[in-house]
Amino acid sequence: MIKNLLKRVKNEETINLDNVSEVKKATKRSLKWSFLAEIFSKLAIPLSTIFLARILTPEIYGISTAVTIVVSFCEMITDGGFSKFLIQHKFKSEEDFKKHFNSCFLLSICFSILLIIFIFIFRRQISALVGNQGYDMVLVVSSLQIPITSLNALYIARLKRSFCFKILFYVRLIYCITPFIVTIPLALLGLKYWSLVIGTIASQCLQFPILLLISHDKVHSRINKYSLKKSFTSSLPMILESTVIWACAWTSTIIAANFFDQATVGIVKTSNSTVNSIFMLFSTAFTSVLFPSLSRLVDNKKEYQNMFFSIQSATLVIMIPLGVGLHFYSGLVTDIFLGDQWKQATFVIGVFCLTKPLMICFNNFTSEVFRSYGHFYSSILYQLVLLGIDLLLKFTVGRISFEWFVWTTALTDIIVTIICFIILKLRYGISLIKQLMSLIPSLLCCALMIPFVLLGTYVGGNIFESIIQACICAVIYLCILRLLFPRLFKNAISYLKRNV
């Protein structure tokens, strides 16, 4: 099997990246494997959560989350945008690429060692900062994965650049099965938060030797000053963007760690990751084609907008009813994915599900518009505005109570959606009326579906009856959509078929 993988890598690397037709063929060939990898990875999170949430308490998840905040930030620094640089930059030759790869490798190692030393020296202060006093050794042990994770990112970037997505699919499978072969057994043995820490480290360690073996790039200690400088300076804007995105992703959790206890932090983070996993599982079919589709049409405004609305409307008619349904069946979602000891998560999941469709269909789409036009710094400024709004609401309204803290996330999502409407209209000339009109079909069909949802929740029943009721409501929604808006229905189905 290893020989076949090596042969496959060698064949894929013969692709001429300057030849448009070859790149298109490679892209088309890679879509299926990229999509499958995304599906498996997004399935792995909720499936492992179903088991782990019944073994571990919210407090244990809170301890693990606080550690993850620090480690994920360090991993972002050590990668330093190097992986994105290796994928996007146009190198003069394969030899030129190898020089830059070597420089990125050495920089990642140096940053990783410095950060591990820094974490060890200031472990108590850092743990206190994220509300994790007394668990500083957990942080130190978790930091050992930083160099492995950053190097994995470089090798994965190498394979992505060569369109080796089938090989990446197998590598991703290793990541997906690790919770089932490492984390869950350790949790059953009573290792508590250590099971999560060891499981995360194991997922990276299991990938590294395989990535190292199938990549024939030889790393040496000889430093090329030009490539070292080029790699670092070209990655600086990406570091800035990654930092802002990281801050936006972890703001709620960091603030919750300072406002509430560890159990509450665990509830907020686990509820959010559960909701994200469910929505990403359904939205991947649409969002995976968004950036490449828009990028090809930036010089044709009419076709660009047609493609934008085509994908957005297809995403809305799936995401909006999914959010409404999960809001009303938030108790069912909690029972299935988390279990009895997570009852407080029902409220959090219900609130997050209401506005998550807006973030996917407007915030994420606006970010992809920035990327497609190459408006890099506009994207950073936009993310900073979102971060500022979230911080303002969290430190004012969010301080009142836990319930208000959760509702500020929904309020932020609504304000961000309004900002997206304005940006897309003023900056890119995308019709405000069309944006609003794209919401009407899904909202109308949801309004007609809600009486059936309320009837189902009123009748109640056990978990299996509730699942059947939810499925019936979904079928009713699709029938209403098919009847009232047949073109939208067919459009959404076409994107789903494209990835099968």
Image (cartoon, rainbow, N blue to C red):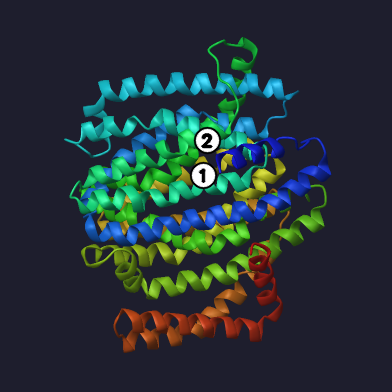
Quadrant of image for the N terminus: top right
Residue 276 percent location from the top left of the image: 44, 57
Tell whether 212 sits left or right of 138. right
SS state under label 2:
helix
Residue 263 percent location from the top left of the image: 21, 52
First in residue order: circle 1 vs circle 2: 1
Q: Measuring 22% from the left and 57% from the top, which residue is drawn there?
A: 55
Which label number is shown at residue 211? 2
Amino acid beneath label 2: Leu
Residue 309 percent location from the top left of the image: 70, 63
Camera-nearest residue between 59 and 359: 59
Vertical side of 194 occupied by 240: above or below = above
Q: Measuring 53% from the left and 83% from the top, which residue is drawn there?
A: 475
Residue 2 percent location from the top left of the image: 55, 39
Quadrant of image for the C terminus: bottom right
- The residue singled out by tag 1 in the image is 171
**Mark 1 near mark 2, Cβ–Cβ under 8 Å?**
yes
> In which quadrant of the rendered view does residue 497 lie?
bottom right
Vertical side of 74 occupied by 454: above or below = below
**Is residue 428 visible from the viewing direction of this image?**
no
Q: CA distance from mark 1 to mark 2?
A: 8 Å
Tell whether 365 sits left or right of 13. left
Q: Residues within 10 Å of mark 2 (few under 14, many from 20)?
A: many
Amino acid beneath label 1: Val
Q: Measuring 55% from the left and 31% from the top, which residue is drawn there?
A: 81
Which label number is shown at residue 490? none
Q: Measuring 77% from the left and 47% from the top, which residue is drawn there?
A: 24
